[in-house]
Amino acid sequence: MHSSPLFPPQPLDVARDAVQACLAVLAAPPALPLRQVSPRRALGAMAGSLQTDPGAENAIRVVRAEVTQRPDDAWNVTASASAWPLRYGADKPLLYLCRPASLQALSGVLVDARERGIVCSDAETQSSRWPKGVQPALPAWLATQHNCTPFDPATGEEVRAILRSALETLYLEQQTGYYYLAIHDEEADEGADENADEGAVATPLSDADAAAASLGMYRVSPPGPAPCRVRLCGAGTMLAVVADAARLLKDDWDIAAQVWSCPSYTRLARDAQAAEQWNLRHPRAVPRLAHVRRCLDDSAAPVIAVTGYGQHIAGQIGGYVRGRFIAVGADAMMEVSAPWLAVTALKALADDGALPVQFVEYALRRYALL
């Protein structure tokens, strides 16, 4: 006689109905202008909508752990303190709001969530001696966990795109694992729309850009009349810094730069590696093209990839980029700032013989970086 399992499998239609209800809420026009609000505020608004919308009632379980409530907190949503009840119920979507600053703390969250669902960490919002508020071992470990898809969104619009992708992947396609989102609380520049022709980062996402963001990167600067001479990639809060560097290059040096948002360097690298392995095993088939190559293969201009974590996180895509590649992170010897990134771009162009090295010397003096 066989005993019943501790966690009996649930009918798939229960999860599908729940996630369809959540997707319908997220597809509706947002109550907040997500192109301007911070990822944290946007996520709070979306979590509130998911719990109060009549069509999504009881469709998602929100867990809020390790975060002390404040009257003005964007994450003041109806939530439980643990994901444990999901072990005895249907496989409903799980949204886990937490603040793990160490790998040990994150491990506790993952045990509670059964390494399942959408884990959102706002550790970056707290003062810390570590980049982005977490021990360096944490993002490095996440990059090696193939059941985890880590993201570092820059805007509320990116958060919405990633949430929708996570719900579809985990609960409609029934793929195993969890998504991890690093959530910051810096508002987008309300005047960014005025600079849209200069690579503003606060533009609402089209359906195509939302899909590309969920794959790891999309272009935020519109096509310009001048040919691109350098590509600048940024994740999270670094996207705004990258956009400022692009403006310096244009205004001070008349150098056109493309700006790309890269919410997940890790997903880009895994996708590129998987494409290479598939092509190796299927030499007669039409080759698969990785998303990072679809985005960047049209030019051999230098690529500078910037992250708020250690530079090895951005460096994961280096082997899949044409032309000169430079990864910049919080462990760099210099401050990650727009002037330094502009100088880095000028140096890359000088190393390629695209402009005199004197430009780099002039820039160092102009920005008082010597």
Image (tube, grey):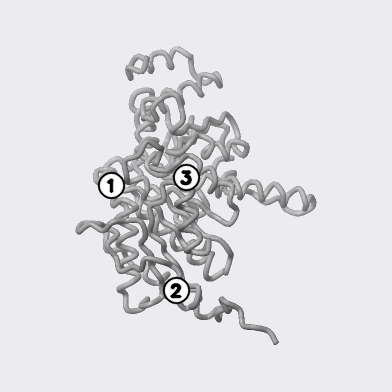
Q: Quadrant of residue 63?
A: bottom left
- In the figure, 130 relative to 346: above or below? below
Q: Residue at x 51, y 63 (%)?
A: 116
Total number of numbered labels? 3
Q: Counting residues from the N terminus, which is met first, the one under dot 2 or under dot 3?
A: 2
Question: Which percent across, then down, holds residue 12?
Answer: 55, 78
Label 3 element class: loop
Look at mark 2 in the image and give the residue it sits on: 85
Q: Quadrant of the C terminus?
A: top left
Question: Which percent across, then down, holds residue 191?
Answer: 24, 43
Residue 173 - label: none
Query: Which is more toward the observer, 218 or 108?
Result: 108
Circles 3 and 1, Cβ within 8 Å, touching? The answer is no
Look at mark 1 in the image and give the residue it sits on: 187
- In the figure, 170 relative to 334: above or below? below
Residue lying at the far bottom of the rendered structure: 1
Q: Is residue 274 visible?
A: yes
In the image, what residue type sits under mark 1?
A: Glu
Q: Quadrant of residue 193?
A: top left
Label 2 element class: helix
Q: Is residue 218 visible?
A: no
Question: Which percent across, then down, holds residue 122?
Answer: 36, 51
Look at mark 3 in the image and give the residue it sits on: 262
- In the figure, 223 relative to 107: above or below? above
